[in-house]
């Protein structure tokens, strides 16, 4: 089975440019998560969706960040305009509840560098 | 808010020996899940083991086992018969069973395996 797919794997852009990160969750999973990993703050949740509906976006840094999930098999995280402090690894993860528990499966991440 | 603390930034172990990584957490909830994730240099986040708080029995997965002490809010990971491929960053994570599905991560422990 294919795991969580993210694209691009690497992105280098200049400050002020728009950046779009993409994610395809595991087929059949109904929750999707966006995390960010930096040296300073570690791994932190940005936003998550359940059945394509945003549930918790308290981790979204500011209005420059936006996320959408138009259908069960695709999500985007957009940064506009990008800033050097947005440089990080962005992970997408998905899960499905089975019984009493669920497990989040992570994609390979997108390493974003903003110059 | 829940917090997860990993007090050992780095650990090392000889190949074939046993090592224990520490994790403590703070929560007022009684029902939750705990996880250990492994992140090798490829940066892929890989689930190692999962523990449900309502279960008294400690989880095991082959060479990996946990010591879950609910009253002490402690969740350590033991790796037996360490292998070179175990070298990675290890992250402890907490997830509420009743509120947000987000994972709250510790800062991680870098494990080195010496041949």
Image: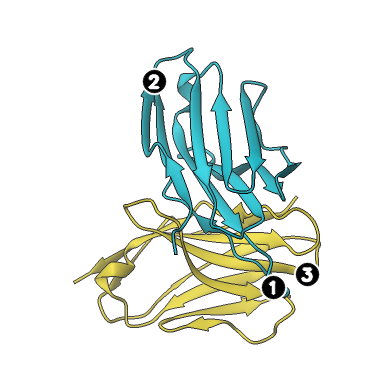
Residue at the disc numbered 2:
A13
- Residue A55 in the image: x percent, y percent? 76, 44
Q: Which mark is residue B31?
A: 3
Please state the total of marks drawn on the protein image: 3
Q: Quadrant of residue A52?
A: top right
What colour is chain A? cyan
Residue B89: percent from the left, percent from the top?
Answer: 40, 57
Q: Nearer the viewer, residue A70 or A62?
A: A70
Q: Which chain is yellow?
A: B
Q: Is residue B111 visible?
A: no
Element on which disc 2 rests:
strand
The percent position of residue B78, horizontal first and vertical second, equals: 46, 77
Tell me: A60 left or right of B91.
right
Determine whether, in the image, residue A107 is placed left or right of residue B102: left
Q: CA distance from mark 1 to mark 3?
A: 15 Å
Give the chain of mark 2. Answer: A
Q: Does A37 appear above or below B39?
A: above
State the residue in front, B92 or B23: B92
Residue in the foreground of this view, choosing between B78 and A114: A114
Per the model, the C-alpha gap separating discs 1 and 2 is 46 Å
Above-or-below relation of B35 to A89: below
């Amino acid at each position: 089975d294919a795991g969580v797919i993210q694209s691009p794997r690497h992105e280098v852009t200049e400050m002020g440019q728009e950046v779009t990160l993409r994610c395809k969750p595991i087929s059949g999973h109904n929750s999707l998560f966006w995390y960010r990993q930096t040296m300073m703050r570690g791994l932190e949740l940005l936003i998550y969706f359940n059945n394509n509906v945003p549930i918790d976006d308290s981790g979204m840094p500011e209005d420059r960040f936006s996320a959408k999930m138009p259908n069960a098999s695709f999500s985007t995280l957009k940064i506009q305009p990008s800033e050097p402090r947005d440089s990080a690894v962005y992970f997408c993860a998905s899960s499905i509840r089975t019984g009493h528990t669920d497990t989040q499966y992570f994609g390979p991440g997108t390493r974003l560098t903003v110059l | 808010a829940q917090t997860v603390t990993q007090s050992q930034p780095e650990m090392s172990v000889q190949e074939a020996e046993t090592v224990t990584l520490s994790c403590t957490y703070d929560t007022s909830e009684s029902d939750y899940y705990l996880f250990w994730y492994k992140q090798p240099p490829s940066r892929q986040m890989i689930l190692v083991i999962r523990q449900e708080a309502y279960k008294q029995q400690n989880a095991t997965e082959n060479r990996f086992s946990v010591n879950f002490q609910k009253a002490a809010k402690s969740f350590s990971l033991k790796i037996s018969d360490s292998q070179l491929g175990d070298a990675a960053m290890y992250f402890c994570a907490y997830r509420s069973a009743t509120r947000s599905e987000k994972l709250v991560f510790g800062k991680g422990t870098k494990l080195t395996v010496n041949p």
